[in-house]
Image (cartoon, rainbow, N blue to C red):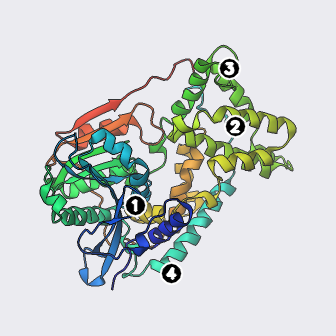
Amino acid sequence: MKFPLFLVFSAFIAATTANTSPPYTFQQIKPSKTLKWHPCNPGFLCAKLSVPLSYQNHSLGLASVPLLKYPATTNSSSGPYQGMLLLNPGGPGASGVEEAFTSGPLIQSIIGSNWDVGKDVNPVTGLKGRGVARVTDEFYEEFIEFGREVGKECEERSGGVRDAGPHMSTATVARDLISIIDAFALTPDGKRSAKPSNLLNYYGISDGTFLGQAFASMFPSQVGNVILDGVVDPAGYLTNFTSASVSHLDELLAAFFVYCHEAGSSKCAYNTGSTPKDIFNRFNASFMQLDPRKAESEGWSNATELQDALLTLKVSLLSPAHSPFEYFPIIPQVLLDLESALQNQTLSSWALATGAIFGSPGPANYKSPDWRLGTLCSDQNNKWYNKTLEDLRHQLKALKEQSIIGEVWSMAVLGCLGWGVKAEEIFEGPFGGVTETPILFVGNTYDGATPIEKLVFVCCLLWSETNIYLECDIVSEEL
């Protein structure tokens, strides 16, 4: 019998088929033990590779891994055909298929048109301080209960030894990568590639860098051209995954006030005063009015409305922290509308309109929770399972001290309180060593999710014979 590696993965592809044009056609492709590519989206090829459901017990049957490829150009001006570059966008649990579909052509334009690109393998100084608006326990309890519901359903539906649940860890995905490159080596493309086809060529982003480090630690002799961008400290990922990730989040948010000031009122409608600090003070005046804890303790009738608005604002600010070029231009109008909503007492309408842009702050907007919890909670060896909110107070306190929007970063670990499916195999180290090919590590000075200090630690202390490229930027000290 054949079993899907990720049950919910199939469901997600189906949902994408219904809502994305052009549609994926994985449902129509029969899994195969060899790589058989089929035309799917215009300009792309799709395949479903059969792999062992369990690498520890092959008698449990097969799983299938969906693959999407943006093929190399025939007779490329970049030179001879190089091989296949595999992608992982992080998450954990984000879709490499979507990453290949949206970014494959761009990545190929950078590395050269003689590469195939694709694959899915998954699964400010002035801002900090204690006197900031904080969410109530209701937010945390809502996500804890949501995680318990998801965990219970997944355990009932896919928690058995022949189901997907025990086989969603990063260690299993690393072994899937071996299956993929082994299958590729047997294809005509694998046999003609200039690069050794038995080596992994890989671009991992954020939590995809944890997979890259796990693979390199498990299979150092099969590391080819590997780029790890936005580097995760493996020890932090396995034990914390909270405050260790957001040490520069407020500094990145502070950049908005700096660039709004530099742009001037003609390009940033939220600009005010003569310094970035003046813009921050304008923001802080609105932010401090969203205080559901005070409203709740004093029995205000609008405590729930304030909570919803505060969470919506914090989620809205998290989006530009991840994608500033996309979201910074939107923030001025969002903040102007917030001022009007506070003045006119229309916060509910503001939260609804803003949530339509950035997503609801509640569990309903938690994308692919099955994948994310299945990977993260398994990798952490279910250490949070059956814990309570009180057990997390120390973690949540650290988040609050790191960032004014730190609470919304806690959603993933809150869900792990309800994930009881145990992974068949996890990899907890040791990490590091000497690889067949040096690894290229990439980082930004102000990264809202993967601090530059983690990159330096990982490069200098865990891995030898590595190359380092640091993409730096300066945020004004005026804040």
- The residues tagged by marks 1 and 3 sit, at their Cα atoms, a distance apart of 48 Å
- The residues tagged by marks 1 and 4 sit, at their Cα atoms, a distance apart of 21 Å
Q: Earlier in the sequence, mark 1 or mark 4?
A: 4
> With respect to residue 113, does 152 lie above or below?
below
In front: mark 1 or mark 2? 2
Residue at the spot of label 1: 380
Measured as percent of width and height from the top left, residue 214 is found at: 28, 55
- Amino acid on which the number 1 mark rests in the picture: Gln
> With respect to residue 344, does 219 lie above or below?
below
Q: Are marks 1 and 3 in contact (CB under 8 Å)?
A: no
> On the picture, is 468 further left or further right than 156?
left
Residue at the spot of label 2: 334
Near mark 2 (Cα within 10 A), the count class, few <14, some 14-19 or many ≥20, is: some
> On the picture, is 7 further left or further right than 61?
right
- Amino acid on which the number 4 mark rests in the picture: Glu
- The residues tagged by marks 1 and 2 sit, at their Cα atoms, a distance apart of 37 Å
- The residues tagged by marks 2 and 3 sit, at their Cα atoms, a distance apart of 15 Å
Measured as percent of width and height from the top left, residue 194 is found at: 13, 49
Q: Earlier in the sequence, mark 2 or mark 3?
A: 3
* Res. 265 mark: 3
> With respect to residue 56, does 43 lie above or below?
above
Residue at the spot of label 4: 156
Q: Earlier in the sequence, mark 2 or mark 4?
A: 4
> Is there any visible trace of residue 383 in the rendered image?
no
